[in-house]
Amino acid sequence: MRDVPLLIIGAGPAGLSAAYRAAEAGCDVLLLERAKKIGGQLVKQTHKFFGSEKQFASTRGIHIVDILAGRTKDLPGKVEILTDATVLGIYEDGVVTADIAGTIEKIRPQAVIVATGAYERTLAFPGNDLPGVYGAGAVQTLMNEYGIKPGDQVLMVGAGNIGLIVSYQLMQAGVKVKAVIDAADRIGGYLVHASKIRRAGVPILVRHTVEAALGDSEVEQAVIVEIDDEWQPIKETRQVLDVDVICVAVGLSPLADLLYQAGAKSFYISPLGGHVPLRDQNMMTTLENIYIAGDVAGIEEASSAMVEGELAGVAAAQKLGYETPDTDQLKESCLAELRQLRAGPTGGKIRTGLALAGVYS
Amino acid sequence: MRKTADVVIIGAGISGLAIGVHLAKKGVKDIVILEKTFPGNGATGRCGAGIRMQWGVELNCLLSKFSVEYFENVNEILKNDVDVEFWQGGYLIGAKDELEAEQFRKNVTLQNSLGIESSYLSPEEAKDMMPHLDVSHIKAATFCGRDGHLNPFKTVEAFVKAAMDLGIDIEKNTIVTGIEKTGGRVSGVKTDKGDIKAPIVVNAAGGWSKQMAELAGADLPVYSRRHQILVTEPVEPLQSAMFMGFGLNIYIQQVPHGPFIMGRGDADEPTDLRMTSSWKFLNDMAETVTTLMPRLARLKVVRQWAGLYNMTSDAQPIYDEAPEAKGFYHACGFSGHGFMLAPATGQLMSELILGETPSIDISSLGIDRFKGDMLLPLESSVV
């Protein structure tokens, strides 16, 4: 049994930011990461970030990992990061079990920050189990992490930011994107991404869905169709595209299994991506001393995940008695930054979701 | 939901369903089964669903023999074709020490006298039957090839289908909030979805049977203890028989599609109706199973869960009418064996309720036995 003040689960942007702020306040941190390297989804984000200077605008995601990890060093509290460490359960006596490089270990933390991120949703259609049907995350991993082209001709399903960015990255890698389709009646992602793709001659077809993947042992064709106001296919609009990759980018859902298992109260809140644990202003769930940060608390951008992580890190450390004269001000500035990140028309969905979750009135 | 019924059964676990089906087959109309969540969500769907005739007291042997024969013919009896996956690979039961081996000799003599074809085995004979068992930990074993295990979900499906074919109403997501009495007789049940008038109410609420009895002002000498269980990843067939040990404190089976399911008892488990899981169980279970079956050490656990044993002080069930409320019947206190006894429970409770002569003498399973010193001999063959 290993005793630690603060356990953070997940070394993505939220978890790394939480570790930094907690250790800055003097709290020792154990940070467990399931993958073999830290960074979460940042490791495949080769594009430059938007937004404010504070959240590393103009820096590529892959480089932000180094900045975030660098910040956790030489602080009053010690941050120990273990990779290949999968948390298995949060038990009712507060003990957390983890598979650390093949060995089951038991950890007794005084507080936990769950920053597990999200999982990719997929679509049900005939042939969706053929090789060649990918989630957008898998395509990004193959290309941006391992330098492997997933195929030559791609149908992208989903015109949200991920679908648009991955389409552009595929084009940069010399892969032909045949079309980007989305069942919604408008493009969900930022116009700046959509414009770049359109300028390169790739059609973005809204009100379209994928009906089937065709092929004997791998994807050879995709059947797409326009849908009507009732979301029913309009048969005469059916087209068959010759593609060897169907990339499904239809959104993410919070990876909240551990919190569900631990008994945290959660609700299905569609604008936040699915079942989301409830939390207070300090990011604490309905379970004492169990906090959340990042996509597990509702699907957003990496920038807000970092700020939520900082907030949870400061708040959890404070709850455990690790405070600095700046603590309260720091929490205020995190809340202000989050409000700023969620302002404007693009933040409408998240504001609605958080209002349903009781975070914003 | 109907406003009146001839019989209301509380609990759509395997016991409540079997009682309903048996009553309906005997011609009782208007039966309603009330279920707090969904059928089989209590101990029924959480148990190992093993069934064995190798018991230490006569009555348990007879009840489980009835059930084995029933499950062997379940599709004919229930008149549907749901495959309940009754796997009769036998039970191999290991004795931890000489004392237990001596008890097992007596058990086999008793079982054989009742027509149960069990046999007493040396550790070497047990090894032949189950090569991955480290028999240095056992002094002897017994085996009965007609024992086995079922798929509890498919079994629930078969009973639910039969119940619906017989016109029984199963009211899901319906919470019993009160039990009405008129002049010492039960007269109806109150629920969060409305009230039902009924002259007969059956308490088949398993882990929650004591709480149901209290609603009728009846005292039920039972308590519920959490028991935990786990399932591993599926692997190639390795183990045909259920292995069980009482002193060794384990039951372990490989289900037909490959995963191993195993559990053990623990006197420190909570008795407050919690169905949470503990890390301690994983530790203890891993230690127990890898000591006995070292080959399983590399198997990955995919899930753990818990259910409630509704316990009596002699580890045998209560089949009786409540003295405090005429027409209110208890079928509970199964002490971890409710699943395997369910067919007998259905048959015997329907006979008891209808005033028929019971197929098996269950006069010793009345609630009075807990008042004085009429307790049954403790069944020691339990995990």
Image (cartoon, coloured by chain):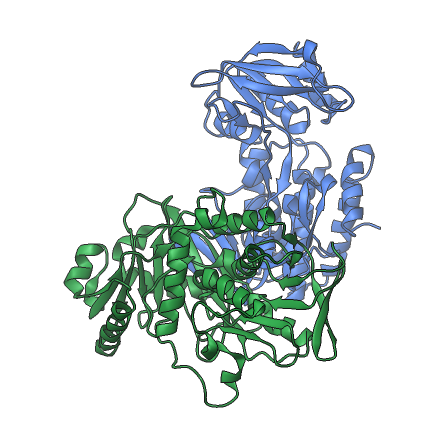
Chain colours: A blue, B green
User: Observer-nearest residue: A58 or A143?
Assistant: A143
Residue at (74, 54) in percent of width and height: B1
Q: Quadrant of residue B190?
A: bottom right
User: Observer-nearest residue: B229 or B20?
Assistant: B20
Instruction: Work out which residue is located at the far left of the displayed protein and give it.
Output: B124
Residue at (73, 27) in percent of width and height: A188
Q: Quadrant of residue B39?
A: bottom right
Q: Position of residue A183 (x, y in %)?
A: 70, 23
Q: Position of residue A15 (x, y in %)?
A: 59, 49
Image height of B158 relative to B141, above or below: above
Instruction: Work out which residue is located at the far bottom of the displayed protein and give it.
Output: B372
User: Observer-nearest residue: B212 or A59?
Assistant: B212
Instruction: Work out which residue is located at the far right of the displayed protein and give it.
Output: A361
Q: Position of residue B72 (x, y in %)?
A: 38, 52
Image height of B177 relative to A78, above or below: below
Q: Position of residue B268 (x, y in %)?
A: 46, 75
Figure label count: 0
* Residue B145 seen in the figure: yes
Image height of B246 relative to A81, above or below: below
B94 left or right, relative to B47 = left
Residue at (65, 60) in percent of width and height: A316
* Residue A81 seen in the figure: no
User: Observer-nearest residue: B87 or B58?
Assistant: B58
Report the quarter where the N terminus of chain A lies: bottom left
